[in-house]
Amino acid sequence: MSSPSARQVALTLALATGILLVAASLAAGQKISARKPVLVTAMHARWAGELDFSPDGTLLGMVSQDRVVVFDPRKDVEVASVGIPRGGVCEITDAGCVFSPDGTLFAALRNQDVVVLEIAANEIILHRSMSGFPFGSVGPAAFTADEKQLVIGGQCTQVFVLDIQSSEVVPSGVLAGGVVSIRKLPTDDLFAVGHFSGGVDVWNVESDRVEKFFPGCGTYSNSAEAWGDFLLIGCGAHEIRLWDIHSNDRPIGSLEYPFLAHTVSVARDAGIVFGASGKARAEEAEGPAVPLLALFDLVTRERLTAWAAHDSRGILETAISSDGKLMASLGYDGELKVWRWPPGPER
């Protein structure tokens, strides 16, 4: 395991005094922050399906119905952009994307296509159709530590391992019945695999063995995020459960906050949770309630801020940089918005 940060140590000490339980529901009439994004851009085709920040937080990647795009969100400059085939039987919400650990590669998954882009060369080094495999559609993915393989999940079957050089696909022993999330854990060979059917497996890619199972919060959206030695499991019931990766006896804490579980992102270096958190109406505002974005500090157990974003149709996806300074949100209004924390000069 990697060495814990000061904030992870602080959280461990805080949890040692008792179960972490936070009730931070938005009261009716509560004032909602009005904030301007540092960037607003229209989406390609209909909308993008997934977002991911590069490990160093300098790039933002996304996959849409017809393009893979990597750009610098601070300058609004495209770094790499390639087209991908249209088609397939699934909606764009069945998609995934992820940067490699060193930030040089970007993998995009959509319907039954897997594309790996070499960012500096703006070149596709792998395009693999998963047609013929019992996926339904491909979705979440994560690179192995050596960046030679891509661990991918499907809509209705087990996890597969794709060799980037040979494009060979090998089925694993993880029978997930629908994969919600795949996250690389600090130990080289371990991945957290979240299921639609409930719970999260900690799976060893080298031995192809499930080493631990963490119960979820029901049977919907048991998405997993890793933060040092902690595993955060988001639930459809607006709850985030915290587990020690070394033990699955019982959760060490629970964050009860009205996050939509599928939108939760974690700033790994900052210990901040970011996500969509229901809807509210700002003071003196007219018309329908608007969706909110919120930041939550894992150590202090406080909601840092919440603000209105996008239109009443809601928020599709969020992402946050590892240092917690930049956030991105995709709305059903067809816009990508990039936000800064703490708020800086608007441009």
Image (cartoon, grey):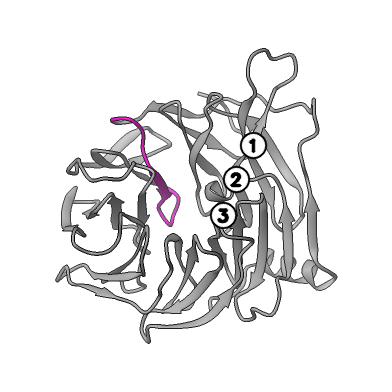
- Magenta stretch: residue 65 in it? no
Report which quarter residue 11 is drawn in: bottom right
Tag 3's secondary structure? strand
- Most common secondary structure along the magenta stretch: loop
Tally of marks: 3
Q: Which residue is mark 1?
A: 278
**Relative to 296, is 112 on the left or the right?**
left
Name the amino acid, label 3.
Val
Secondary structure at badge 2 equals loop
Is residue 113 at all visible to an observer of this figure? yes
**SS at circle 1:** strand
Left or right of 290 in this view: 67? left
**Callout 2, which amino acid?**
Leu
Q: Is residue 140 visible?
A: no
Disc 1 to disc 3, how far (Cα)? 18 Å
Q: Are marks 1 and 2 in contact (CB under 8 Å)?
A: yes
- State whether residue 245 is above or below residue 69: below
For discs 1 and 3, the disc positioned in front in the rendered view: 1
User: What residue is pinned by disc 3?
Assistant: 266
Magenta part of the protein: which range? 45-59
Residue 260 circle label: 2
Give the residue displayed 76% in from the left and 36% down from the top: 26
Mark 2 packing: few (<14 Cα in 10 Å), some, or many (20+)? many
Report the amino acid beneath label 1: Gly
Residue 57 appears at what percent x and percent y? 45, 50
* First reached walking from the N terminus: tag 2 or tag 3: 2
